[in-house]
């Protein structure tokens, strides 16, 4: 039987994209992961502040520290992206402004995350020599 | 730069903000699990979160001072 609905009308009638639960859960998982990571981060910052540059370099070069640092920064910027995304979605309603700000948010958080991870890995792989 | 008085002031503020955000995040997870949503509990947990943030920040800076980090 022929459908009298246009393709656009059908698409509009489909409603939500259907991945809201995954997005919602991802936000919580990131936040929960940051609880131990941030506590470790504060502890680490206190230790590093009490020592000199050479100590910091060899500290970052230790695999456990480098791994936790990468996780801390990666999850932090992911969490930052999630949080700012919700702010934009809640308060910006003009399609073009919203799309632009969501893209900007993703790019800035992605750039900051990539830069921080590369910096940690650079010290981790070349450190200890200084 | 971070060792200057202004740097330390900013770091202190970041410590306070981090602990406040951390505790309030846990508060939100508890709400998501369906607990503490009545007004009385919500008001009480707000006070707990602020008290924790202040106490944890002071504790970190006291320990940092004792270990020579400040």
Image: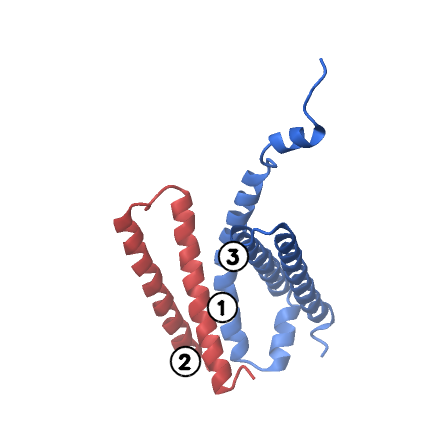
Quadrant where the image shows the N terminus of chain B: bottom right
Label 2, on which residue? B66
Q: Residue at x 52, y 55 (%)?
A: A87
Viewer-side residue, B39 vs A123 = B39
> Badge 3, how many Cα within 10 Å: few under 14, some, many 20+?
many
Viewer-side residue, A74 vs A110 = A110
CB-based contact (under 8 Å), mark 1 and mark 3: no
Label 3, on which residue? A34
Viewer-side residue, B9 vs A53 = B9
Q: Residue at x 34, y 43 (%)?
A: B35
Q: Colour of chain A?
A: blue
CB-based contact (under 8 Å), mark 3 and mark 2: no
Q: Colour of chain B?
A: red
Q: Taking A40 as reference, is B56 left or right?
A: left
Chain containing the residue with disc 2: B
Q: Residue at x 37, y 41 (%)?
A: B34
Q: Is residue A115 above or below residue A54?
A: above
Are discs 1 and 3 both within one chain?
Answer: yes
In percent of width and height, residue A24 lies at 53, 44
In percent of width and height, residue B24 lies at 40, 57
CB-based contact (under 8 Å), mark 2 and mark 1: no
Image mark count? 3
Label 1, on which residue? A42
């Amino acid at each position: 039987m022929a459908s009298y609905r246009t393709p656009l009308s059908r698409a509009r009638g489909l409603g939500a994209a259907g991945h809201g639960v995954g997005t919602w859960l991802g936000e919580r998982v990131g936040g929960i992961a940051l609880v131990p990571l941030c506590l470790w981060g504060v502890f680490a910052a206190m230790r590093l502040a009490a020592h000199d540059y050479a100590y910091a370099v060899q500290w970052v070069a230790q695999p456990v520290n480098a791994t936790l640092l990468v996780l801390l920064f990666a999850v932090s910027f992911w969490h930052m992206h999630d949080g700012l995304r919700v702010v934009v979605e809640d308060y910006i309603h003009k399609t073009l402004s919203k799309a632009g700000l969501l893209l900007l948010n993703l790019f800035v958080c992605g750039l900051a995350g990539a830069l921080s991870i590369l910096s940690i890995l650079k010290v981790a792989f070349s450190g200890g020599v200084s | 730069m971070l060792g200057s008085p202004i740097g330390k002031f900013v770091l202190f503020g970041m410590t306070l903000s981090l602990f406040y955000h951390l505790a309030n995040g846990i508060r939100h997870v508890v709400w998501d699990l369906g607990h503490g949503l009545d007004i009385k509990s919500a008001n009480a947990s707000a006070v707990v979160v602020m008290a924790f943030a202040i106490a944890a920040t002071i504790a970190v800076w006291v320990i940092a001072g004792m270990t020579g980090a400040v």
